[in-house]
Image (cartoon, rainbow, N blue to C red):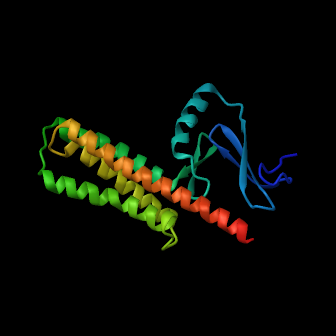
Amino acid sequence: MVECETCHVPLVLNDTHYWACWQETFWVCPKCEKMFATYRQKQTSLLKRVFLGLLRIVQHNGEHFITLKVFGENVYACSRCLGAYITGFICYLLFGFLYLMGVSLPFYPVLIVSFVLGSVTLVDFASVDLFHVRKGSNRMRFVAGALLGVAAMLYFWLLPTDWWFRIGTLFIYNVLAISVALIALRVRKNDGKAQISVG
């Protein structure tokens, strides 16, 4: 019998998904409505497990995901991350080729365009998950993530400045983005506690 860690009451089976090479079973507590998950590794070939295991980098969100069929397995990819990795990979090759060809672009247009495109993801995340001013959709999350992938590779390859400046400023941008995400998670956690105390 599976019990809630907080309430110590039996959990109710909510849903079962296959996340790459793992079977993930979701349980919900009937008292506090907290979600739990249990995992069981599936019997698959080593090559398949390695490839599907790599895809776990985009499988971290149980709330909004896009279901993909890979090697006959369901992959539940985070909408934003999927968009970012697809366009990021394409633009990594494209902009990297332009960089090797010696293509030079003006500093400020590249800086402004890359940060405007990247900020779309931050605004989308903050407005949906942090401030709750609108309801998000997987389509918008995917588009925002795709713009982030373009922005990151544009900035990384084609900003006409030294590598230390590019890497350093990207690091600062990532720290700010992670800070917003952590604040959103804390706000969501506090909202959940408030709902439990009211209930």
> Looking at the image, how many numbered discs can be counted on the residues?
0
> In which quadrant of the rendered view does residue 119 lie?
bottom left
- Is residue 135 shown left or right of residue 72? left
Residue 165 in picture, x, y percent from top left: 21, 41
Residue 146 in picture, x, y percent from top left: 39, 55
Furthest residue to the right? 1
Quarter holding the C terminus is bottom right
Residue 16 in picture, x, y percent from top left: 74, 50
Q: Residue at x 45, y 58 (%)?
A: 142
Viewer-side residue, 58 vs 171: 171
- Is residue 16 shown left or right of residue 58? right
> In which quadrant of the rendered view does residue 122 lie?
bottom left
Q: Does any portion of residue 84 appear in the rendered image?
A: yes
- Is residue 73 shown left or right of residue 88? right
Residue 10 in picture, x, y percent from top left: 86, 53
Furthest residue to the bottom? 133
Q: Residue at x 88, y 45 (%)?
A: 1
Q: Residue at x 58, y 61 (%)?
A: 188
Q: Residue at x 20, y 53 (%)?
A: 111
Viewer-side residue, 151 vs 199: 199
Above or below for 14 versus 101:
below
